[in-house]
Every structure is written in C-alpha cells, then in structure tokens.
C-alpha cells in the first residue's frame, strides 16, 4: 500500500514538473496614447490580475510572479529597435460632404480629392476604404443604399483620377454613427458625408 | 421567363452584389512592410510574407532574426512584430458596417507592438492578446508585449 502511494505521488510530481512551461519571461509595456488620452493594459496570469495605466509602466511575469516595472523611451528603443521601426503608418481619414438627397459633392469638399491623392501617393502598399453616410431624412433602407451610392461615386472619382481600383473598397453605413445625432426624418447636412480612409 | 420575375432576380442580384462588393475585400488584414525573412503559415503551408499580401484569421506570422513586419488589420489595428517572433491571429471577425466583432492574437515568442483599432475602441472586451501564461486586455491603446526565455 505504501509503495502504491509512493508510486502515485512520484507520478503526480513528475506530471506537475513535466507540465511546467519553459522558464519564460513575459512583459507588457504601456506606451503613451496620442493627445495624452488615458489608457490601460490589464494582465491576467495564474489567477492574478494587474493593471498599469501610466505610459512606460510595465508588468513583467516570470516564475508565476507579476512585477511592476518602468522603462524610459530610450530603453524601449534599445530593447526593441526593429519592432519600433516596423509599426505601420497611422490611417488618415478625409471627410467629404454632399448636397441633400444625392451624390453631388458639396462645394467645400471638392478640394479634398487632391489631398487624398497626395496622401495615397506618400504611402507604400496603401489601401483606401470609402464609407458613405446619410442623415435621417428618408427610410433606413433607402439611406443604406444612398450611402453606398455616395461611396461608389467617390470611388469612381478616385479611379478616374488614377488611383487603382484594386486598392479601393466601398461601404455604406447609412444612418449609423452620425456626426450630429438627430431625430428620425431630420435633415442634417453634416451627416451627409463620405469618409475616405487611407491606410 | 416572366418579365416581373426577371426584374426581381435582377434587383436581388444587384443588391447582393453591392453588399458583396462591400465585403469582397474581407480579409483580416494587409501586410504593409516586411524587413528580412518573414513567413506566413496558413493551413500548414509556409508562404513568404510580402507587402500588400492579405492575411486571414488563423494565419501564423513567423519572423527570422533581424526581421520584422508591419500589418494593418481590417479594423485599423496596427501590428508590428520584431525578430524571432511566432504569433497567430487566432480569432478575427469584423463587420465593417456595424464595426463590431472580435480579435484574439497569440504571441508564442518574440515581440509585438499593438495599437488598438475600431474593435478595441468600441468594445475593449472584444480584443485580447494571449501569451503562454498570460492574457492581456487593453483600454485604449498602444503597447508592447514580449515573450522570451529567462536569461
């Protein structure tokens, strides 16, 4: 009976040892947010939870322990030079506005097409997403279709101006996410818009 | 075929095509830059990573030493991977009209910089990063994670 217990417990110990992960060190470092906006990372490991909320604060996990650390921007640059250089450029959005009920660009938006072309030309491997929106005058279904038509009209303008059709995708979001929320049925020129997002 | 049936079929096809053109580019993300030796492992096959390549959910990114890669996901999440990294896009669903879905990236070894996109901005709980013994949730934001053997 004693031998069975011994064999069982050594088997159990071996099992525990075999299932231990490699000795790994895991690190999570919070970086500053644009405009100094607040941000946080929440780290959960082996039943423990830890949070950091200040830029350059970090949590290091090793041997089942969570330790708080701080790094300087220079240290981070030294530790991760290739990583820091590899982050893609931030997307940039342009908003174009329309006359009520159709696909004619409002006067103030015609100059933006040139800005859009310039931004596309500056990027390597660019892609363009054209997203149409409407105000709440009209039915939701009609507005979903109208918003897609607006997006396609801008896409066609970009193609006519030499941008490759392959890199452009179009989406209609209808009445969703208005710039200026209104009651149903209300005209609001600021919501009749197309967003051209370049990445 | 009766004229009205034809009209209905044409309209239905047009509507379906217009929706599908919105989804036609439904890939999980696009490679923007590659430095050095990087491969994408998909369904057991290894493909050389090149800029403009489209990525899919379940793709694994493997970078060699002195190598790195920059990727933009469909929801505008920015990813950068450093050298000697193995990472998988374990889950990625994104509806560009509703701007919802979920994203789970795993980092087995190496380093990753993650800048939250629309999924993380609209619903932070829909985005996660998993390391061998840790999961990370983010509010915001811009952060680095790394996994290395203890020295």
Image: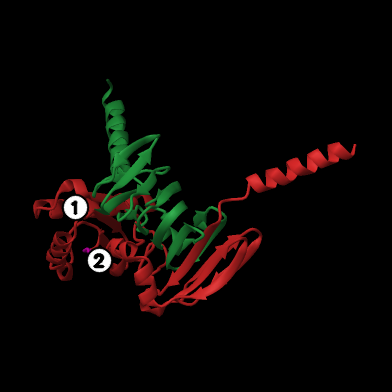
Chain that is coloured red in the picture: A
| Foreground residue among B139 and A7 | A7
In which quarter of the view is residue A89 placed?
A: bottom left
Q: Is residue B95 magenta?
A: no
Q: Is residue A187 left or right of residue A114?
A: right
Q: Tell me where residue A182 appears, x and y as whole percent.
A: 40, 68
Q: Is residue B130 left or right of residue A17?
A: left
Looking at the image, the residue that sits furthest to the left is A161
Task: Indicate the quadrant containing the N terminus of chain B: top left, top right, bottom left or bottom right.
Answer: top left
Instruction: Give the residue at x 24% y 62%.
Output: A100
Compared to residue B85, the image places residue A42 above or below, namely below
Determine which residue is flagged by label 1.
A155
Whichever of callouts 2 and 1 sits on the residue coming sooner in the sequence is 2
Hey, which residue is sitting farthest right in the picture? A1
Residue at image location 21% in from the left, 49% down from the top: A167
* Residue A131 x/y as whole percent: 29, 56
Question: What residue range appears in magenta?
Answer: A94-99
Q: Is residue B112 above or below residue A57?
A: above
Q: Nearer the viewer, residue A51 or A137?
A: A51
> Callout 1: residue from which chain?
A
Under circle 1, the secondary element is helix
Chief secondary structure of the magenta span?
A: strand
Q: Which residue is mark 2?
A: A95
Q: Colour of chain B?
A: green
Question: Distance between the Cα atoms at labels 2 and 1?
Answer: 13 Å
Which corner quadrant of the image does residue B56 belong to?
top left
Q: Percent from the top left, x then y, of residue A112? A: 16, 67
Callout 2 secondary element: strand
Q: Nearer the viewer, residue B64 or B52?
A: B64
């Amino acid at each position: 009976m004693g031998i069975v217990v011994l064999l069982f417990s050594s088997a159990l110990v071996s099992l525990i040892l075999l299932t231990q992960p490699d000795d790994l060190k895991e690190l999570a470092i919070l970086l500053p947010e644009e405009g100094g906006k607040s941000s946080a990372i929440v780290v959960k490991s082996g039943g423990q939870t830890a949070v950091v909320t200040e830029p350059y604060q970090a949590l290091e996990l090793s041997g089942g322990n969570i330790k708080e650390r701080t790094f300087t921007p220079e240290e981070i640059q030294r530790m991760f030079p290739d990583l820091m250089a590899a982050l893609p450029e931030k997307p940039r959005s342009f908003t174009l506005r329309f006359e009520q009920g159709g696909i004619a660009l409002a006067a103030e938006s015609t100059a933006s097409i040139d800005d859009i072309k310039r931004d596309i030309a500056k990027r390597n491997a660019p892609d363009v997403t054209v997203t149409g929106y409407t105000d709440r005058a009209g039915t939701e279904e009609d507005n979903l279709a109208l918003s897609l038509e607006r997006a396609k009209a801008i896409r066609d303008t970009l193609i006519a101006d030499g941008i490759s059709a392959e890199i452009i995708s179009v989406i209609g979001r209808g009445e969703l996410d208005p710039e200026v929320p209104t009651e149903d049925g209300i005209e609001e020129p600021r919501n009749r818009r197309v967003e051209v997002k370049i990445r | 075929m009766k004229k009205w049936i034809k009209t209905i079929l044409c309209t239905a096809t047009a509507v379906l095509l217009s929706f599908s053109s919105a989804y036609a580019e439904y890939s999980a993300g696009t490679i923007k830059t590659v430095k050095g030796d990087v491969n994408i492992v998909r369904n057991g096959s290894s493909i050389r990573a090149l800029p403009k390549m489209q990525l899919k959910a379940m793709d694994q990114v493997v970078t060699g030493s002195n190598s790195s890669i920059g990727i933009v996901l469909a929801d505008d999440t920015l990813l950068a991977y450093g050298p000697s990294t193995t990472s998988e896009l374990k889950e990625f669903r994104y509806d560009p009209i509703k701007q919802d879905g979920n994203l789970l990236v795993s980092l087995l070894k190496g380093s990753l910089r993650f800048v939250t996109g629309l999924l993380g901005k609209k619903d932070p709980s829909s985005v996660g990063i998993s390391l061998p013994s840790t999961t990370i949730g983010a509010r915001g934001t811009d952060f680095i994670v790394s996994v290395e053997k203890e020295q």
